[in-house]
Amino acid sequence: MRIFSPTETESSERRVAIVPASVTKLTALGAQVAVEAGIGASVNFSDPEYRDAGAQIVADRRPTLASADIVLRLRKPPLADIAALKRACIHVSFLDPFTDVETVRALAAAGVSAICMEMIPRSTIAQKMDALSSQASLAGYVAVLLGANRLDRIFPMMMTPAGTIPPAKVFIIGVGVAGLQAIATAKRLGAVVEAFDTRPGVEEQVKSLGGKFVKVDLGEIGQTAQGYAKELTPEQLAKQREVMEQRCAQADLVITTAQVFGRKAPVIITKAMLEKMKPGTIVVDMAVESGGNVECSIPDEDIVVNGVKIIGWRNLAGRVPRAASAMYSSNLTNLVDHFWDRTAKTFRLDPANEILRDCLVTHDGAIVNERIRTLAL
Ligand code: NAD
């Protein structure tokens, strides 16, 4: 089978889909691997490194897209690239399926079997392919460093002959993959860390990282079968905001990571709450791409409200692109490896498979994922 990885087309994206170590693994499976010239330039991998790992370097993506059996990339494909793919090509990438139905429709119309990396199930067996988790983990780390950089104080307590400086107080809202990594990073830097999540089950995880779990009695909430949080009622959200307001007023750095899969993120920090925070407080809104947890955060901008700085940068994992590419590339390679038939040296695409029935969104000319099909109607 011919596997092709083209360069990313989004100019601000520095992450790449495939690193040379993955080329070695894919060629060892018996696949023929081609990458577009310059694919690794943004993360300092040269074409000769890809060639040494076993890849063919192609200068013109169009004919290689047309002959590829499997295309591996990071971001969703431009429509022109979809038009170039051959029917029954297996295309693996993020697809942003909840906001960009047009791309999904185009993939279906082209007869492409599109595997959507956002839809990899949250199961033990699929963990090795879970790119949302690998990227969220790095994003949590970056969010803390960004906040630390902007803060006018230090994280650790310092006792010196010149006096004692108290540790910074960090408050993290949302303790999923990103939130846990943010807690661990802030603790390592010496901050005092508090955290809150609507899923009370995470209390133990917060404590095990040295953080303090903030309790709010919200009544019945729960989580989906995939482990994602359910949406709160307006009454529950109002109750949550009351406690958040008190904790945010004490904090030096607030990091919000609260998301509800496939829906707009809840607004947790209102403008009125920002006005009650100490001037100089930094707020990093990690949910900015899905609507934002902070009322006035703006994608890719820093704004100041009453002396509080709100950082709304998207794609935080993309700020450590070499590490993020290594992890994403492993996720892709693990996926191919998992479905690889070692005898026939082909990718076994069974739409009924327990992993593929969640993440295969188009197949055989149709949108086969029910949730996405409903959106596309
Ligand atoms: P996410 O990015 O969807 O959301 C981040 C966090 O925000 C979640 O913990 C969620 O509970 C929380 N949240 C939602 N609404 C909130 C609100 N109003 N206030 C405060 N917090 C709110 O979640 P995620 O990081 O992708 O992970 C969700 C869960 O899935 C975690 O328990 C994680 O450990 C689990 N998980 C399991 C697997 C696996 O088994 N393969 C893989 C990844 C994650």
Image (cartoon, rainbow, N blue to C red):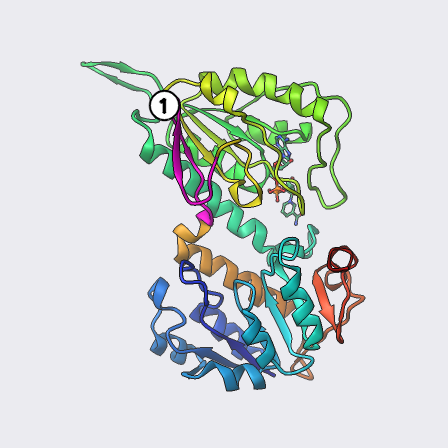
Seen in the image, is 89 located left or right of residue 49? right
Is residue 31 at all visible to an observer of this figure?
no
Seen in the image, is 14 located left or right of residue 363? left
* Residue 128 vertical placement versus 192 (above, below): below
Q: Specify whether residue 306 is painted magenta.
A: yes
Write the residue at 40% across / 23% down.
Answer: 252
Q: Between residues 200 and 104, which one lies in front from this camera angle?
A: 104
Q: Residue 269 in the image: x percent, y percent?
A: 54, 26
Residue bearing mark 1: 307
Q: In this picture, which residue range is highlighted in magenta?
A: 297-316
Q: Amino acid at mark 1?
A: Gly
The total of numbered circles placed on residues is: 1
Write the residue at 40% across / 83% down.
Answer: 59
* Residue 171 vertical placement versus 95 (above, below): above
Is residue 230 at all visible to an observer of this figure?
yes
Q: Decide if ligand 1 comes within 8 Å of the CB at mark 1.
A: no
* Residue 312 vertical placement versus 275 (above, below): below
